[in-house]
Amino acid sequence: MTSAIILAAGASQRMGTPKALLDLHGETFLARLTRIMGARCDSVTVVLGNHVDRIRPHVPNRARVVVNPDPDRGQLSSLQTALAELPASDVAFIPVDCPAVSEATVAALAHAFAHRDPSMLFVIPRMNGKRGHPVFAARSISQEFLALAPTDEARAIVHKHVPHTQYVDVDDPGIFADIDTPEAYQRLLQETRA
């Protein structure tokens, strides 16, 4: 069983409005990620923190909500909040401000994860030698994430296990799209316009 985790607890200070609710061609960032991750995972968990009251009414019905009680500790604390609720599950996690990843990329990652060598703990998309999101991780790695200080970064565990990581090369700049500012949002809309 693989559970998708969408990290949507941030304050969105530079954006000035909750990024989870931004529109990408008729879908909110949150709705789009719930749909495309949910198509390849058995469940979807959304981690909220800041702006809970604004975002919760817009969480798609199929997603479960968990609330990070102290989201200002950083994104790892949100991942830890979700992992604590999913102790027996493989996971695939992605920040809500990375909404442009393609459905084909998620499908390729899910397929690679399901058919990976058992020694592989991570399956991660890569383009031009650079890693992106979402990250698929074996359930056995959860305790290592949970053992980190909340102010650490998840990449510390990812870097530690490079020899146990399978990369999937994709032609998808959406694996990098980190939408933090109004300017980045406008570029995304222009670049992804149908």
Image: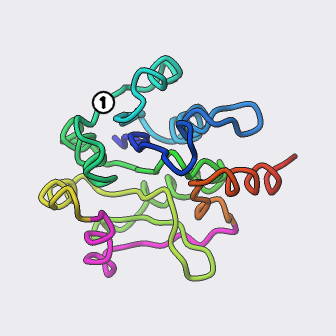
> Image check: 189 left or right of 108?
right
> Image check: 32 left or right of 137?
right
Give the number of callouts: 1
Element class at badge 1: strand
The residue positioned 46% from the left and 51% from the top of the image is: 94
Q: Nearer the viewer, residue 110 or 69?
A: 69
Residue 18 percent location from the top left of the image? 53, 36
Q: Is residue 50 above or below residue 10?
A: above
Amino acid at circle 1: Val
Q: Is residue 35 above or below residue 83?
A: above
Q: Which residue is mark 1?
A: 66
Q: Residue furthest right?
A: 194
The residue positioned 50% from the left and 72% from the top of the image is: 131
Give the class, few, some or many, for how many residues have Cα within 10 Å of label 1's Cα (few <14, many ≥20): some
Q: How is the image coloured?
A: rainbow
Residue 29 magenta-drawn? no
Q: Nearer the viewer, residue 83 or 170?
A: 83
Instruction: Magenta stretch: give its range.
Output: 153-171
